[in-house]
Image (cartoon, rainbow, N blue to C red):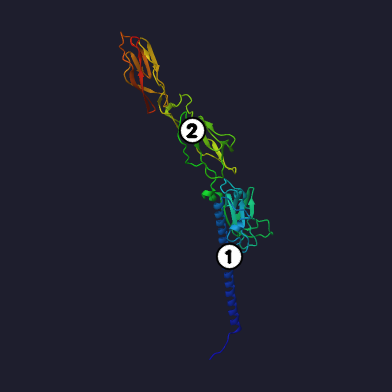
Amino acid sequence: MDRRGFTLIELAMVLVIIGLVLSIGITAFTILAKRAKVNASKEAVNAAVEAVLGYTYSAKKLPDATQFPQIVRQSRDAFGKELVYIYDQGLTDYCGRLSTKITLEICPDPACTSPVQTVQNVAFIVLSGSGNYNNQTAGPQAVTTDTTIRVYDYGVNVDNYPDDINRVEPYDDIVKWVTLAELHSNKACRPVTFPQDIILPDATEDTPYTAKIKITGGKPPYTFGTWNGTSCDTTTQWNGSGLSISSDGLISGTVNFDTDSQPGSITDCGGTITIDNICVEDSLGDAVRNSSPFTIHVKPQNVKILTETLPPAYEGSDYNITFSAMGGGDTYIWSLSGSLPPDLTFNNGQITGTVQSDVGCSNFSPYTFTIAVDSCRMQAIKGFSLTIIDPDCR
């Protein structure tokens, strides 16, 4: 039986193979371990973002730097570094603001002369420094002035965070941001807005009117004003057609749409009051202008015959009486049902003529009839009586 052992060459080859296997295994393990830490850090960043959103929707404002570590589930990433929280300090009073002071640029190179993407109105940013010595994006801060935060493509050699040692490394930060528009998707964080479905109640000419313009979002109280082209002037308020808007959005007054017509009447049987160029400012100073004019449809008052009674007519004397009405439009159509004394006629709202003279007491009195007036598809009817004074009758 052959009991020959391994030669030195064979042993050397075995050792080389074992070394290669161990080297590959250690490298693979290192890669997997780092990948696991990166994934865990991503989960920590995502969880922190969700925690900030939950707090924001509940409190209607962003947490500040002292509240951030209290509301997140874990304030460190898998590499042991503190998560970085960058936020607009103006949003710690209310999350429904119209703009922020944070702009984010995604850069393909260290100079970032041509950003791949520019994101305006960023509300807050949460980031992990990942495996490098430090984060390369920015330090934690409450932004109070216009600030640009740069995020680089992975692998770009950069050290953009100046508050640490000067150590340029391949960029590997894990960054997640939330824009103001994303906050506004929640009802609790919507900015001050004129609702698009505002319908003001109809008005009646020459009668009192009140209506309230409702505003959503923002932070009450609201102050109404007029838009001067660039901003909301809350020292002046809209007025017109007998109405005005108070600083709290109440429309009130006595409607006077048609100044040329008699009280209660409107030419063409109706009209529209247009309210444009108004704006509103909330208590934080955010202001918006109504995107489309508000309208108030004005209708005339119901047609009404104003004449109450008729004076008597005297036998042998001229008689002339004109009926008056209000409401409707400028044009009235009059009609009479019944009978008038002989020689008196009714035309266009007038009774005219001369009461005939007779011998003896022969005039039957009083005469009763009905007057009707039509205007703007409305009608008023009223009964009258006319007495004839006959000297021959006691």
Picture quadrant where residue 13 is located: bottom right
Relative depth, front residue between 68 and 313: 313
Residue at the spot x=58%, y=62% of the render? 41
How far is disc 2 from disc 1 in space, using C-alphas?
68 Å
First in residue order: circle 2 vs circle 1: 1
Q: Where is 172 relative to 323, above or below?
A: below
- Where disc 2 sits, the SS reads strand
Residue at the spot x=57%, y=70% of the render? 29
Dot in front, 2 or 1:
2
Q: Does the rendering let one see residue 127?
A: no
Q: Amino acid at mark 1?
A: Lys
- Residue named by callout 1: 37
Residue at the spot x=51%, y=49% of the render? 187
On the rendered structure, is 288 left or right of 206?
Answer: right
Can you name the residue that lies furthest to the right here? 165
- Residue named by callout 2: 209
| Percent coordinates x, y for residue 371 in the rendering | 36, 22
Relative depth, front residue between 37 and 20: 37
